[in-house]
Amino acid sequence: MYKILNFATKEEVNPKHMVFTGGVDNPWEIVMDLEKVKNKLHISSFKNMPPHLSKYLPFMPIKKVPEFISLSEEATPLIESKKLGDLLGVNLYFKVEGKNPTGSFKDRGSAVDIGIAKEMGAKAIILASTGNMAASCACYAAIAKIPCFILVPENVPFAKLAQVIAFGAHIVKVKGTYNDAARMTEELAKSMDFFLAGDYAFRIEGAKTAAFEIIDQLFYQTPDTVIIPMGCGTNISSYAKGFSEYKYMGIIQNMPQLVGVQSNGASSIINSFTKSEKTVEAIPSINTIASAIAVNHPIDGVKALDAIYSTGGTAISVSDLEILEAQYMLSTHEGIFAESSSAASIAALIKLSKNAMYKNKKIVCILTGDGLKDSQIVLKTATRAPTIAPKSSDFTSLYDKKFFEAKSMIFIEKNKKLFSKLPSEDELKKKTKNIFNVVYQQKEITKIRGALDRILKKGKEITLSDLQDSVQDAFSATDQPNKSKNNFSVKAFDVSSSKDKPAKATVLVTVKGKEYNSTSEGTGPVDALISALRKACSNQVHSFELLEYKVDLRGQGSDAVVNVEMRLAQKKSANHTIYSIGEGVSPDIIQASIEAFEDAYNGFEIGD
């Protein structure tokens, strides 16, 4: 039915363990007996079947077909572009792999990988992952009722790990890179007799079905070019194998050109392609927002290079900002929200479309995962939504001030330094016009400048993310009558903390023109501060409590500006409670917390 070969030497291998990898230099591959498949398959009937994963079982190394682990996977959408194709001058299609059961292309390979593990009687499955494969294998292992252990690099997005937990798998975070985690899983699989799942020989046999689907969905016409994001290199290898097997069967006559894409911050395969090499060297470190393709030493790098060379393709790298802009264009022009790593294929197409050889060509961009997989990337780029009182006038105020005319996504390096000293109002007006594409009114410019002044006084230079937060903070501080009275303000404070002891805070506040002070302890500096503030106000207002305390850190480094959002509840009577939300922005979390408390406290009358 199939053989396991060394991809480099083409020699047959016979593994002693349930580990099907020869390593980075000599990866293994599954070679199906396509002659047997060809003899058994009635091509005409096969072509008349609608595309879905189970249709392609004759091409898979599954021996016990009735026991094949499936979630009744239908073909993922192949969507013709509504706008981007015309803008770029190509006949463009999107293969939306985020519509697989767990939201990424990994499900194709997992169905086969976990199916083989079940056939072999594996007592457990172990794997390394940057997130998508973890969720996918956890899901299919749950169906197969096999325990699943997953080692992930410590910086994997939490949204992906939430899926893993929901499917009942066991997560262990590893300090280091994906390759460090992968090395450990291989060692553990051999020593504990577990099945090693991942970007190894069997996975390609499921992943290649995406190539089958593209041909089926194009009514057995071959696209000119297919653009694919690359991490470990396994996916582009899978497309090459899928197209080549369809060609062998006579279903298509030509192979499409395959284009591999990596981020500038994780471009090991690109480095080799640029030098026309056939092997891949590890890069010392990776630095990219595209976590799903952030691999410093790709296990299937040599296969990826072979896929590119054998199809007359190319490889291209893109920056994180190009990825983010492409992701936004895809969402706003096509209505498709794809994971940032997926959008690398769109970023690459934007570059390639400038070359005349791609004009009017039929091109398929592979979108490997759903945007919800790593939505924090978008949230970090976007301007935060303003918080207003439940009054129509507050919304119309924002509208009249042209807040909504500003860009909601800014594609500039977030840590780019903008100001090292306080800009004049004219300088600030020009800078905000240039960045946000809107002219703010004088009142807002004054508020923004005041927020920047407070940040600069803390000894920090102003970055783009700082300016974004200051703009949003200025518009959130709407002109509500009760807030303009400044019923409450913090005049002075002192917070201290030491190891293994409660923190202590002392505050001096003004409430309606009178000064009050208070001291309190807490489990940490912020807790002690809030406790002291509540105590100082306790005799002046009805009882109130802190319902929510949220912290958002946009920038990088220990001096990054912190945005604090605080929600207070004030009980007026047994049946009457009002609520108020306040926000504060500062590189000092204590200062930001104080500003948020002041803002919330002074807004208590809003709900009356």
Image (cartoon, helix red, strand yellow):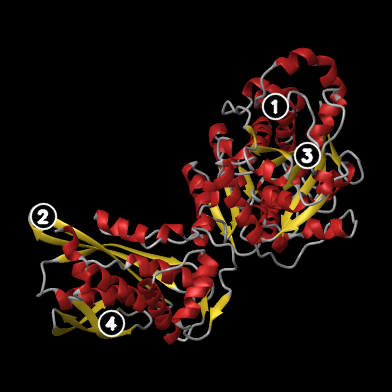
Q: Are marks 4 and 3 in contact (CB under 8 Å)?
A: no
Numbered label attached to residue 504: 4
Mark 4 and mark 1: Cα distance apart in space? 66 Å
Residue located at (50% from left, 61% from top): 380
Crowd around label 4: few <14 · some 14–19 · many ≥20 (10 Å): many
User: How many numbered marks appear?
Assistant: 4
For disc 3, the neighbor class at 10 Å (few under 14, some 14 to 19, many from 20) is some
Callout 2: helix, strand or loop? strand
The residue to which callout 2 is attached is 576
Work out how far the residue at label 4 is from the one at label 3, CA to CA, in angstroms. Answer: 68 Å
Viewed as shown, does residue 408 lie left or right of 365? left
User: x, y percentage for residue 374?
Assistant: 54, 52
Q: Mark 2 belongs to which amino acid? A: His
Viewer-side label of 3, 2: 3
Please state the horizontal and vertical placement of residue 467, each as a whole percent of the image.
Answer: 47, 72
**Compared to 25, does 33 lie above or below?**
above
The tag earlier along the polypeptide, 3 or 2, is: 3
Spatial CA distance of label 2 from label 4 is 33 Å
Q: Which mark is residue 360?
A: 3
Of 135 and 94, nearer the camera is 94
